[in-house]
Image (tube, rainbow, N blue to C red):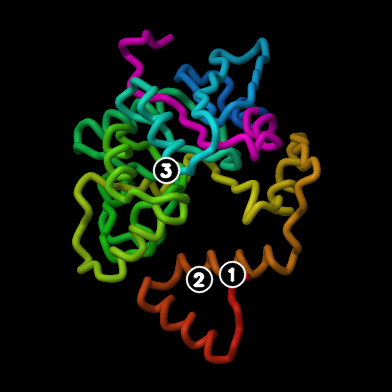
Amino acid sequence: MMSMEEKMLSIYVSSYDGAEDLWQTFFDIFFTYWRECEYDIYLINNEKKFKYEKKEIKTVPMVIHTGVEINWFYRTIQSLKKIKTKYVLFMLEDYYYSRKQYNEEYEKIISFMEEHNAWFYQLTNKPEIKMKINGVVKIANDINYPVNLQPAVWNREKLIKVLEEIDGVTPWDFELYFKKNSEVGDGSYIPGAYYDDRDIMGYKNGVLRGRWIRSTIEFYKKRGIKIYTGERERLSRWKEFKFWCAGKMSTKLSAKEKRVIKRLLSIIKFKYLE
């Protein structure tokens, strides 16, 4: 077991009181695939209490309260300042694992980040690959959403600095900031930013635009994991298909090609995503 001095990473689960119905499912799935997690785990919310306890887990999640809701940026900055580790694994409350996780794998990631002075290390695959270092992808500044809020290990202080510089309100303000920068990018690499193309998480998204993704529910059901859906609606199969198509398009096309196609679709008054 790692000592407090050895721990350089914490698990950061971004949420708010309005997503209370997702917390139990998140941790049920989290500990199904990472029961031996030795890192401190923080659930971020406003004021609601939450307790998750199972005898077989090593680390009991802790809650960081940020008070009455102001906005996502405020909540994220204030909570990050309460964490002491150099790095955080940034997650949202509907980001799920589907592959077994090992503490040793994250120790290797931290070692890589220390060696390469990295501040952003995304764990979900980004197909627009231009250069790899032993399977790790250097990020060019002209790809779609080069830095984003997908599951990633962040240098905590760097993330705080980026948030303060953007000075936005919603998560979309964060992603839009980097998207706009990519539209004028020259293809050079962003120092300290990397993707890991192995998909070590087996990443699954649970909720899209406030609604459950049917295929995700069905995926875990087949594996004996029941997702409590509560009163939250499910995405229609048609809309899920459209989002799936959009995702595939994003992986095959450059940012410029994607903008051209969206303009052409708008001419025939086709709303690709509603």
Q: Is residue 200 left or right of residue 107?
A: right
**209 is higher (above) or lower (below) than 26:** below
Secondary-structure class at tag 3: helix
Q: Is residue 81 magenta?
A: no
Q: Is residue 5 left or right of residue 1?
A: left
Residue drawn 80% across the image and 44% down it? 231
Secondary-structure class at tag 2: helix
**C-alpha distance separating marks 2 and 1:** 6 Å
**54 is higher (above) or lower (below) than 173:** above
The residue singled out by tag 3 in the image is 73
Mark 2 Cα-neighbour bin, 10 Å: few <14, some 14–19, many ≥20:
some
The residue singled out by tag 2 in the image is 249
x then y, percent, for residue 91: 49, 38
x then y, percent, for residue 47: 59, 26
Segment tinted magenta in the rendering: 1-27
Residue drawn 44% across the image and 23% down it? 103
Work out whether mark 2 precedes mark 3 in sequence or the reverse, and give the earlier one: 3
On the rendered image, what quadrant is the C terminus found in? bottom right
Which image quarter: residue 82? top left
The residue singled out by tag 1 in the image is 245
